[in-house]
């Protein structure tokens, strides 16, 4: 796409991700400030602007330390007359809920859009919360685009609405929209030369205390009423009449007087579902603005129908509001919603097809039911596959060491004397088999927070609390200070991989070197920070040094009070990327490969199950005997398996890649038997 | 309106998302054409399940394209609604079996990647024979190759499994896209010559 994202103009079209479309909408609207704490599925919204910032005039991008700071940043920019975009994942709004609750009181100057990536089905989150409910008390208006084009168009429009009514506007995008990729028709961008900040004092709006707060409360309730009127006629809300949409004019009119209400991606599922079951003759209300609801529009829609089905995900935010309106107008018809569709899990297109088919008594085509049954018939034969650490991930070494030190490898027993507190980040994957390494996982920095209370409540247990570097900086420092002040009897292990890795490797406050190998100024020294808090037990270790690490953990658990271990090793993906950029592989230095010698392997499972590195794989020989081997293509030579093998079955081989490459341009390390004569066996 | 749906599944790092993007870029040439489809990215790089949907839409007329009941499409593929399933790992083919119907074409990679549950002995990795049986019960059009082996033999790494599999799509299915369009897209992308060669390897399988 070269740089269509930046240079595209009206008339251009390109394949683009939903998140990129949101970023593009902001760009077309002249956004000057863009911030977020990274979080799947929303990350690419700000990543896209950040990675293109050198081509965009007058833009500032920031990966803030947390969502609270990030939203406040957007507010400051807006008050200075700069259109601002803040993005976060669903649970981010919990952290940013404080500024969100003041935004209506103070209002905005330049448009402020808060793009929220929700995550129904929780493929990348620790809960499924529907952030729309917040608006019942923050009064932040909500726009819900249904597809990629609307993601861009609604974002652009949101800036205008924000300024017109002086609200920060929420743009809701579930993961199915954030990560929908398809055609976007571009629009023109505002003149970026005009972007310049000028903060003007506005005490009437920005100061909130005593009666000043009450006055502002009254003002925003009034603005909300104006916005409801706007929603009556806004083109973002659409009624599709039973006839207009359909080309089949001669089809008999549906006299059931049934209608559907939906919004966002679920509306797209609904349209597809109704086409799927040949039920395209029902009235539909598509809500683009889902808070505040247009009361006039809802009344008009309801009054024309006997039964209305609200199709939406989660607990039924629309149903809640619409039933209130229906009550006020004394609506006599029936309103369906959560009696048909689940309040939990992702609402898939299949769910909408099934729900609509059952309700309308119009069966889906036979092949749909057959396909559903086909999977049901074999689903118990398909081995489960859950994510695990990347090959060479330093977290694997950490989790392995912790389990070895506490004696819980490969067990999910409920009776453990060492409690292991999880937290949010890549290392969270350690809660999955085969490690089963964690005792709870909820929100950011719940590990040490809950752990320090358990250390008081149950003195018989030893407690290890884990935290990643990015999560630590997000909101962990106050928790740690609390633990210091109360001298909590806890081992706190900071898994410092130098990056916010899970969301695409944004830098953390202590990232010292960027991906190009250039030092980052003002990087915080983690150890100095810990020392300044008065913590006396601080050790640093390489987590891939698993034997030393597990001994260290055992020792630390014997000590009383607060102990901190920094498990420091850079994320392997970043290290590999940097090496690729610097072309390290072509340097004239010895390369290493690890080989699993099947004749010495007794399949003790230390590497295959306990460590569970994905590069160690299973193969069958012709005589059907199974053996383990190291997939040299996948292996990144971290050497941890070599260290853990109790039988010396894994050997380290050193050779000179440079000479191999020079002698034969298409080197195949797997099959190149001749060149093995050059290999020097060092272990 | 004609539709052609392709589901691509596999594991993080196999180039599933890239394969989807290449196919989607082929839909930019006509005004009466649309394409979209969501991606499951969560497992990227971490051994997790990754999928990409490619839904081609061909409108019969401008008025149909402007029809609000026709021009909105779910980002997902409904059960039985995929014309083609490309899967880069055998058991992921089974997991995606609900997308296909008796007329669908299934193209899959026979190279296995053992999940943790199998490592731990909690479940058994099915035999290729059983996997094929399950697939042939649904459709006759099943094509399977060791894409990993082909990629390693030709390019020294598994980097090309995705593009080789795209070549197979153009050889074995009635995808309503010209292969020249894909070749042009590959030509403009990174590692153009390798990708063109990989595409052609797939075309000739």
Image (spheres, grey):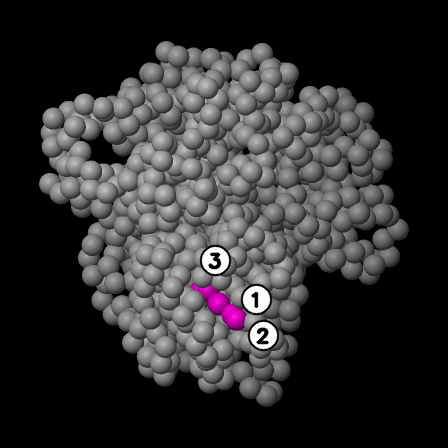
Q: Is residue A361 above or below residue A189?
A: above
Label 3: which residue?
A403
The answer to which of marks 1 and 2 sits earlier in the sequence is 1
Query: How far apart are the alpha carbons under marks 1 and 2?
Result: 8 Å
What residue sits 76% from the left and 32% below the top? A357
Q: Chain of mark 3?
A: A
Dots 1 and 2 on the same chain: yes
Of residues B164 and A379, which is closer to you in this image?
A: A379
Label 2: which residue?
A460
The segment highlighted magenta reads A462-467
Which corner quadrant holds the C terminus of chain B? Answer: top left
Asked if one can make out residue A405 in the rendered structure from this viewpoint, the answer is yes
What residue sits 63% from the left and 17% below the top? B138
Q: Position of residue A284 (x, y in %)?
A: 71, 40
Of residues A233 and A579, which is closer to you in this image?
A: A579
Q: Is residue A466 magenta?
A: yes
Relative to A250, is B118 on the left or the right?
left
Q: Dots 1 and 2: beta carbons under 8 Å?
A: yes
Label 1: which residue?
A417
Relative to A676, is A20 on the left or the right?
right
The furthest residue to the right? A332
Dots 3 and 1 on the same chain: yes
Mark 3 neighbour class, 10 Å CA radius: few under 14, some 14 to 19, many 20 or more: many
Query: How far apart are the alpha carbons under marks 3 and 2?
Result: 19 Å
What residue sits 63% from the left and 59% below the top? A414
């Amino acid at each position: 796409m070269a740089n269509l994202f930046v240079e595209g103009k009206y008339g251009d079209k390109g394949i683009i991700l939903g998140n990129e479309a949101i970023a593009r909408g902001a760009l077309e609207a002249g956004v000057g400030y863009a911030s977020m704490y990274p979080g799947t599925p929303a990350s690419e919204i700000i990543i896209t602007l950040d990675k293109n910032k050198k081509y965009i005039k007058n833009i500032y991008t920031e990966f803030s330390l947390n969502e609270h700071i990030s939203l406040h940043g957007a507010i400051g920019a807006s008050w200075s007359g700069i259109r601002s975009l803040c993005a976060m994942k669903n649970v981010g709004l919990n952290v940013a809920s404080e500024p969100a609750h003041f935004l209506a009181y103070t209002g905005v100057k330049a448009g402020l859009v808060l793009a929220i990536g929700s995550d129904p089905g929780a493929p990348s989150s620790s809960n499924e919360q529907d952030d729309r409910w917040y608006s019942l008390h923050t009064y932040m208006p909500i726009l819900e685009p249904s597809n990629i084009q609307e993601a861009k168009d609604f974002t652009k429009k949101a800036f205008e609405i924000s300024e017109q009514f002086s609200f920060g506007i929420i743009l809701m995008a579930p993961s199915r929209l954030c990560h929908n990729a398809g055609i976007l028709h571009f629009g023109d961008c505002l003149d970026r030369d005009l972007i310049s900040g000028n903060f003007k004092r506005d005490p009437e709006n920005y100061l909130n205390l005593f009666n000043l707060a009450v006055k502002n409360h009254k003002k925003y309730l009034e603005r909300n009423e104006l916005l409801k009127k706007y929603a009556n006629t806004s083109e973002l809300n659409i009624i599709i009449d039973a006839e207009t949409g359909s080309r089949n004019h001669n089809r008999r009119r549906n006299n059931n007087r049934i209608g559907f209400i939906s919004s966002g991606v679920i509306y797209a599922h609904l349209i597809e579902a109704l086409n799927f079951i040949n039920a395209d003759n029902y009235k539909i209300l598509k809500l683009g603005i889902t808070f505040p609801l247009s009361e006039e529009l809802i009344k008009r829609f309801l009054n024309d129908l006997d039964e209305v089905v609200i199709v939406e995900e989660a607990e039924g935010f629309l149903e809640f509001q619409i039933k209130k309106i229906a009550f006020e107008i004394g609506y006599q018809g029936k309103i369906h919603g959560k009696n048909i569709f689940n309040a939990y899990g992702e609402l898939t297109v299949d769910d909408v097809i099934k729900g609509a088919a059952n309700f309308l008594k119009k069966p889906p085509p036979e092949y749909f039911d057959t396909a559903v049954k086909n999977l049901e018939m074999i689903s118990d034969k398909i081995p489960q596959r859950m994510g695990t650490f990347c090959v060479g991930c330093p977290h694997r070494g950490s989790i392995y060491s912790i389990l070895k030190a506490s004696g819980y490898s490969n067990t999910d027993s409920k009776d453990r004397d060492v409690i292991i507190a999880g937290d949010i980040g890549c290392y969270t994957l350690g809660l999955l088999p085969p490690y089963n390494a964690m005792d709870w996982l909820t929100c950011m920095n719940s590990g040490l927070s809950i752990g320090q209370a358990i250390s008081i409540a149950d003195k018989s247990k030893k407690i290890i609390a884990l935290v990643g570097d990015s999560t630590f900086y997000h909101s962990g420092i106050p928790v740690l200070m609390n633990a210091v002040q109360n001298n909590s009897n806890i081992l706190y292990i900071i898994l410092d991989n130098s990056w916010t890795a899970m969301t695409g490797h944004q830098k953390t406050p202590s990232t010292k070197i960027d991906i190009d190998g250039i030092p980052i100024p003002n990087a915080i020294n983690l150890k100095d920070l810990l020392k300044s808090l008065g913590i006396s037990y601080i050790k640093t270790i390489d987590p891939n040094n698993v034997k030393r690490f597990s001994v260290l953990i055992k020792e630390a658990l014997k000590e009383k009070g607060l102990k901190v271990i920094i498990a420091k090793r850079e994320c392997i993906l970043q290290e590999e990327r940097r090496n690729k950029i610097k072309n390290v592989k072509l340097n004239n230095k010895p390369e290493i490969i690890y080989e699993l010698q099947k004749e010495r392997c007794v399949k003790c499972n230390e590497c295959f199950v306990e460590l569970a590195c994905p590069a160690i794989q299973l193969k069958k020989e012709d005589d059907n005997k199974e053996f383990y081997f190291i997939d040299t293509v996948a292996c990144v030579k971290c050497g941890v398996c070599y260290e853990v093998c109790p039988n010396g079955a894994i050997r380290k081989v050193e050779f000179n890649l440079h000479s191999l490459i020079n002698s034969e341009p298409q080197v195949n390390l797997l099959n190149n038997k001749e060149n093995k004569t050059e290999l020097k066996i060092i272990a | 309106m004609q539709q052609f749906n392709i589901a691509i599944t596999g594991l993080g790092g196999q180039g599933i998302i890239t394969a989807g993007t290449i196919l989607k870029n082929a839909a930019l040439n006509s005004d009466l054409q649309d394409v979209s489809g969501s991606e499951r990215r969560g497992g990227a790089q971490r051994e997790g399940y990754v999928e990409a949907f490619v839904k081609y839409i061909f409108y019969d007329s401008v008025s149909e394209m402007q029809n609000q009941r026709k021009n909105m499409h779910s980002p997902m593929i409904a059960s039985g609604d995929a014309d083609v399933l490309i899967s880069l790992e055998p058991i992921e083919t089974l997991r995606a079996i609900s997308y296909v119907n008796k007329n669908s074409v299934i193209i899959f990679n026979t190279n296995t990647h053992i999940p943790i549950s199998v490592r731990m002995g909690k479940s058994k990795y099915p035999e290729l024979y059983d996997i094929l049986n399950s697939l042939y019960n649904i459709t006759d059009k099943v094509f399977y190759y060791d894409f990993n082996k082909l990629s390693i033999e030709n390019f020294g790494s598994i980097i090309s499994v995705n593009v080789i599999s795209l070549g197979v799509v153009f050889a074995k299915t009635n995808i309503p896209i010209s292969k020249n369009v894909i070749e042009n897209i590959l030509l403009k992308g990174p590692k153009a010559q390798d990708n063109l060669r990989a595409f052609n390897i797939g075309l000739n399988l």
